[in-house]
Structures are given as C-alpha cells and as structure tokens.
Image (cartoon, coloured by chain):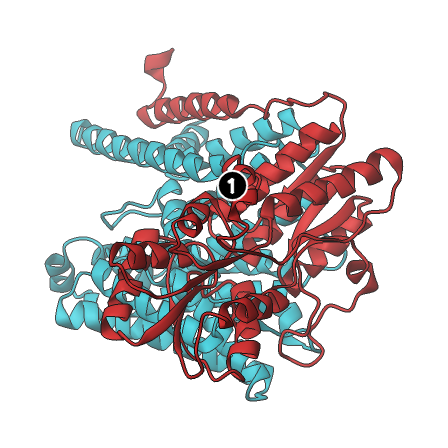
Chain colours: A red, B cyan
Amino acid sequence: MWTSITMRGRAAIAGVIVATLLASTIGVEKQTAHASAPTIYVIGYETQNPFWQAEKRGAEQAGKDFGVNVIYQAPAVASTAGMEQLARAAIAAKPQGLAIDYTDRGMEKVTLDALQAGISVVLYNNNRFENTGAPGSATTNPLITGLAYSGQNEHNSGAVLARAFLTYLKAGAKVLIMNPFPQAFVLTLRYQGLQRVLAPAGIKTTLIPGGADEGNNMSLIGAYLQAHPDTAGVIGLGDPAANPAATYIMRHHLKVPVAAFDVDSEALHLIQAGALTVALNQQPWLQSYHAVQNLAFKIKYGLTPVNVDTGTLIVDKSNVGNLVNVIQSGRG
Amino acid sequence: MDTLRLLGRKIVRARELGPLVGLVVMLSIFQAINPLFFTPNEMTGLTTIAASVGIVGVGVTFLMIAGEFDLSVGAMYALTPIVMGKLLTTFGWNEWLSFAAAMLLAVAIGFLNGLVTLRLGIPSFITTLGTLFIVNGMNLLLTSGQQVEYYGTSTLFPILGGQLGSSPFYAALIWMVVITAVFWFVLERTRYGNWTFAAGGRGGIARAVGVPVTRVKNINFCITAALAGFAGCTEFGYLGSVSSGQGTQMELYAIVVAVVGGTSLFGITGTIIGTFIGALLLGTLETGLVLIGAPGSLYTSLIGLILIIAVIINVRLDRLYTLRMRRAPK
C-alpha cells in the first residue's frame, strides 16, 4: 500500500507523523503546585533580560508560597504588541488571575477584556496612567486606574536617582547617559525624571542608545569616554548599561562615578568594588511576587488587592551588604 | 473517476498540502489538550498574530519568488505607522492623508531597495540589511523612544484594525484574506504572475523571452515594502499605539511563513496560499503554547524546528518531483 501512495503523499504523511510527534513532546507544563489550584498568568515585557528573569522568579516563588499555579509568559522581543497577544491568549485559557505589565494604552482593551471575562487582574511593574503626550491619550477608565499595582513610578525614580547622584557631580559637569532599549518608553520616562533634577542643577547630559548586548554597550561607552575625557559621570537607564560602564571604568582605572537603575548580582559586585557608585533598586522580584500574592489572596479569600510601592531604594557602598544575599539568591 | 483521480493527484502535488496538514494536526492537538482552544479570545489572538505576519509574508513571498529578499520589512512595519501617527498627532494632518503619505514613503523605500539592488548589482540581502538599520534609526529618531498614540475619533482606524461587529475577529484578518486572494490571483492567473516566476529563475533566459525582469523585481520590492507598512498600520489601528520596537524580527517571521508555506529560498517556486497557511500555523503555535501553559521560550525554538523541517520536506519534494518528471514516459 505504501508504494501505491505518491511521493508527495508519502512526504505529507511523514510530515504529519513528525508534526504529531513534535507537538506531543510539548506537553503541558508540569503542575508543581496542587492540581486543583487556581491558575494565574503573569505577562512580562520580555524573556531575555536579567531584570525580567527576576520578575519571572518572583512570580513563580509566589506561586509556590501561596499554592497557586503561575504561568509566566513574555515575548522574545520586548513590545506592547507582543504582550497584548500573549495576554489575549492567556484570557482564552480562562485563568483565575492575570497580572499585566501595563506599559501603555495599547494594553487597555485586553485588560478590559480580561475583566469582562471575569478574570481577576492586577498590574505590576508598569501602570502607565500619566499623560503620554497627546492630549487626552492617558487611560482614564476607572476600571483600569482602580486596579492594584505593585511597582515603582518611573519618572519619579529618575528624579530620586538624580538627586543621589548629584552629590558626586560639580556644577557644569558633563554626564553620559546610555539607553540600552530606546524603544522602551519606561526608560524614556526615567530619562525625563533624571533631567528634571539634573538640568536645573546645570549638569549637561548626552544621551546615546545601546542594545541588549553588554559587550557591545561597553565598546560604545568606552569609545565615548575616550573621545570625551572630560565626562564627569555615567548613568545607565536600564540593564545592561551601567554595568558595562562601571566595568570599563574599573578596568581603565578612571575616576568617573556611575549610576544605575536596577540592581542585579553583577551590579552588587561592582558597587562593592567601588566601580558602580549608586544604584536604584526597584526590586523586580518583589513586584511580581506581590502581584501574584494580590491575586492569590483575592481568588482564595476574597481579599481586595493592595498597591505596593516596591521602593526607590538607593544602594551604595554603605548599604550594599544588606542586599548581597538577597540579590545573589535571585530575589533582587 | 479520472477527474477525481486527477483532482486527487493535483491536491497531493500541491505545495500547500504539507503546511495545511501541519496546521490541521496542530489545531487538533491543541484542541485535544485544552478544549478552550476554539474560543473567541483564542481566535482573536490567533488571527491577529496570523494577520500581521501574513500580510508581510505575502509581500515577502512575492519577492522571494522573483528571486530577491527584503530584510527591511520589520523596520517598515514600524516606520509606516510611526510616520502616519506623527503626521496625524504632531502636525495635525487629516488621517487619510497621513496614511497615504506614510504608504507612499513605504513604496519609495521599497523602490530605493530595488534601485540599489538591481541597478548597482548589490545583493538584495545586503541592500535591505542596510535599509533595516537605516530605517530602525529613523524610527528611534522620530519617536525618541516614546510611543506614538492616537485614540481620538477616526473613520480610518476602525477600517484598518477595528473589531468586526461583536465577533472575535478584527479588520486585519479581512485584510489578510483580501490581500492573499488578490495576490494569489495576480501570481497564478495573470501575465505579471508568470513574469514574477520567470524573474526568479535565470534572468538572462527570462529577458530573452521578453520578460521585463528588472521592472518586475522593482515593482515587487515596492509591493513588499508597501505590504509591510500596511500591516504595521493595521496594528496601529488595532492597538492605537506604535513604538519603534514594533515589528522587530518580523522579517524573520515573514520568511518563516513563506518557507513553511512552500516558497523556495532560491526563487521560482512559491505559493501565496501556502504563506497564508504558514501565518495561521505561526499564530496557532504561539497562542496554543500559551493556552496549554508551555514555557513561552519554547515558541521561538519550535519556530526554528518547524522551519528546518519545512525546508527539508520542500527540498525533498522538489527533488522527487523533478526525478519523477524526468522518468515519466513522454
């Protein structure tokens, strides 16, 4: 019978078998929590960044601690469109809870659809309710603005870090700022927050774009510092920007203070070594942890989710010791 | 009976059969694992993803059949709606004029891609790689890292990306179906389609029989850029916002859906319907994995695996078919 089937037919059948085998190896992710436990989807901004890996760990730990099944999903490349698609697919799975990173109004419809589907929703890491530019473009829907949020205010965090960094700068100093993800609006907000404090203090800033590759960013920063030896400070708007800057400065024995947003284990080491001067820790692990906690308490006990400010903690050499164990264990 | 046999043979020989079978199997498996697969929200997600990559994929397929590549489609996917949004919100232009101007820009960039590739003899892979970087830079320059948003009253946005009544489907899906139908007709039923196939082969021979190879390829570059830009505008209509990061890696996904759908990397061979199926397959895979709770990172790995399998199958089929044709009695 096999020989009576055409070549194309045989190939099609082979393709079916392969596809079936392939699909069957995917399986369903093993439920390490209780089989009948509520399911919570957590939608992140991207998969590849250490910051977002901390968010993923926080969510998953909360799942274990509170007895809920947590499924973390994020697009491979950071984008609102990617998150929206994943959130929509998550709604189709009819989970009991959904944690959303509300980066901009593009997430509005899917958030409302989740609420309409009877899914409990909280926001974390981002709750972009402030006006984004065009008049009237901010989300004012009370169904969304009333949702609990665990995270930090990006614009304000820029101002907080700038105030801390100013103590290391003289008036008229020139500061390099690197944005590793120019398409990430939250980093633009941090930049605006920095400028709010630095500009009136007479600090001149230069903004350069970077990328996701730490080595590449180090080359860019190194090239800039060589061309501008009067640079008095470097600020990284996100990871990886300040870490490669601090590494370069340490290797070349320069006396240039560096400030960072987001503290990971590498940043801890650089702070202890004195290469990274000051950092702002928004505690990504805690953001998603509290998001899942909020949802777990609501689903299981009917409690109302609460807002959690995960902090604008300034970390420097004087208090870094407190954070070492926390961040190195992946809970930073 | 003979008619049925001929029909059966035609179906089995169709390049679309493989991806179609793959799609049916994938749909069946996901539905079997989680019966919530065929629900409105899932269908919204699946078709939205499929429409975005499918519209871009149709353009890329058309160009690949003609023997060229365009790696700048991902950047065009963002640039066109960014320009449209900027003209609308910053300069207060009429939305239709903004859209038209942005689309003209897309066509112009496609034309430049063709000009550099065909007149200067630079491989299209390199030309459009350069364009990718240039346009990405333009996107960052225009947006300064911020979203471009528009949530005001509009007659155009619902047409581009609005919901179709109370159904789970959005306008982008209709656009994908229409564009697929139109380009299938052009490719399979018109002289221009024949020219496109011929241009993908040996250019000298095609020119010798009167095919305007350079003109055909240039037009196809324009079509590819225009469709990429249009797809970006449908997403703008759907979300109301666009950022410079939108469309990142879209060029790779578009090539994947074209190849999975049966289009050859070496030109001459391809099918618009296959690309349509490939796009649905990609949308099914992404939403299905989320539905069954599989790790999100698995999606990217599986796309790579499916791509390799699809190419192996297509190459084998081409060789076997050529062998059978040579051996067939005259």
Q: Residue at x 59, y 88 (%)?
A: B92
Q: Position of residue A318 (x, y in %)?
A: 52, 53
- Asked if one can make out residue B287 in the rendered structure from this viewpoint, the answer is no
Residue A22, quarter of picture: top left
The residue tagged with tag 1: helix, strand or loop?
Answer: helix
Q: Against B73, is A72 above or below?
A: above
Horizontal placement of A238 versus A298: left or right?
left
| Quadrant (top left/top right/bottom left/bottom right) for the C terminus of chain B | top left
Q: Residue at x 60, y 30 (%)?
A: B30
> How many discs mark residues in the rendered view?
1
Q: Position of residue A68 (x, y in %)?
A: 73, 30
Kindly identify which chain the residue marked by label 1 belongs to.
Answer: A
Residue placed most toward the observer, A93 or B174: A93
Q: Against B311, is A169 above or below?
A: below
Q: Position of residue B225 (x, y in %)?
A: 38, 67
Crowding around mark 1 (Cα neighbors within 10 Å: few <14, some 14 to 19, many 20+) is: some
Q: Residue at x 40, y 50 (%)?
A: A270
Q: Residue at x 38, y 41 (%)?
A: B260
Residue placed most toward the observer, B258 or B248: B248
- Asked if one can make out residue B198 in the rendered structure from this viewpoint, the answer is yes
Q: Position of residue B197 (x, y in %)?
A: 26, 55
| Quadrant (top left/top right/bottom left/bottom right) for the N terminus of chain B | top left
Q: Against A171, is B228 above or below?
A: above
Horizontal placement of A64 versus A23: left or right?
right
Name the kind of residue labelled 1 in the image.
Val
Residue B91, quarter of picture: bottom right
Q: Which residue is mark 1?
A: A324
Residue placed most toward the observer, A231 or B318: A231
Residue lying furthest top:
A1
Residue lying furthest front:
A318
Horizontal placement of A60 versus A255: left or right?
right
